[in-house]
Amino acid sequence: MAFLRSISKTDPASLIAGDGVHLRTPQMSDFAEWAELREVSRDFLTPWEPTWPTDDLTKPSFRRRLRRYQRESREGNAYPFFIFRDEDRALVGGCTLSNVHRGVQQDCTLGYWAGAPFAGQGYVTRAVRAIIPFVFEELKLHRIMASCLLENERSRAVLRRCGFREEGHSRGLLRINGVWRDHVQFAILRDDPRL
Ligand SMILES: CC(C)(COP(=O)(O)OP(=O)(O)OC[C@H]1O[C@@H](n2cnc3c(N)ncnc32)[C@H](O)[C@@H]1OP(=O)(O)O)[C@@H](O)C(=O)NCCC(=O)NCCS
């Protein structure tokens, strides 16, 4: 495991290396590949995500997205990454650390997605395994939280396989596909075994 380049306030090419995948800060040059992957994955992803704005896959919207990402990373509030397969550098999905709390909490929230053509091949599991040491060793946080819809067995399997433990249910936690939905909460702590 290596942080090829640590996340810095100014470095848009920061990399986290995993097993056969690497995570990189999104860049404008990713737009075409990202928009195509999200479009072909629309039916696969939309049941599990907040409603996509109508202009979501346009270039101006992507530019605004990147500006938000840059601001949040600069302020230490969130760290968004795209997941690339090492062998051909194909964009296979995304993985975001958000809601970074310092002070007494020292935690963050993990979210992720895989493009439909790449799902079920272990890429997100490997990306999550790579991001865990980044959170604990580089950001020096204490807890990573993640939540899934109760029926999202795939997502729950990813978290369990990486060492996250189930902590309970939250009612109406997130508005998914237009509806406030109950979620199952998972977390991994800095000293928990990493699988
Ligand atoms: C959930 C998601 C991120 C997982 O990414 P992925 O790359 O497909 O995950 P992986 O291939 O690393 O692992 C999937 C695991 O779930 C298992 N799985 C796949 N389909 C399953 C299903 N229908 N029921 C139960 N388990 C399932 C796989 O077998 C694998 O486990 P295994 O390796 O022990 O067999 C991806 O499928 C996705 O983007 N889904 C739609 C959007 C979404 O759910 N986002 C997350 C919201 S919390």
Image (cartoon, helix red, strand yellow):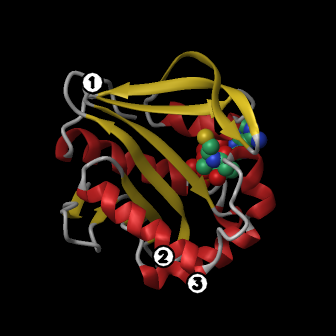
Asked if labels 3 and 2 touch by Cβ distance under 8 angstroms, the answer is: no
Q: Is residue 181 above or below residue 25?
A: above
Q: Which residue is mark 2?
A: 63
Residue 22: in sight, yes or no? no
Sooner in the amino-acid sequence: mark 1 or mark 2: 2
Badge count:
3
Q: Quadrant of residue 81?
A: bottom left
Rendering coords of residue 60 (x, y %): 55, 79
Tag 1, which secondary structure? Answer: loop
**Residue shown at 35%/50% (left/top)?**
78
In the image, 111 versus 92, the foreground residue is 111
Circle 3 residues within 10 Å: few <14, some 14–19, many ≥20:
few
Dot 1 amino acid type: Gln
Dot 2 amino acid type: Arg
Q: Is residue 34 above or below residue 82?
A: below
Locate the N terminus and report the quarter of the image it occupies: bottom left
Tag 3, which secondary structure? Answer: helix
Mark 1 CB within 8 Å of ligand 1: no
Position of residue 143 in the picture relative to residue 49 (left or right): left
Q: Quadrant of residue 41?
A: bottom right
Depth check, mark 1 against mark 2: the one in front is 2
Locate the C terminus and report the quarter of the image it occupies: top left
3D distance between C-alphas at marks 1 and 3:
38 Å
Q: Which residue is mark 3?
A: 32
Q: Is residue 146 above or below residue 13?
A: above
Dot 3 amino acid type: Ala
3D distance between C-alphas at marks 1 and 2:
32 Å
Rendering coords of residue 3 (x, y %): 22, 59
Q: Which residue is mark 1?
A: 105
**Residue shown at 59%/54% (left/top)?**
113
**Residue shown at 46%/65% (left/top)?**
82
Residue reaching furthest top?
Answer: 168
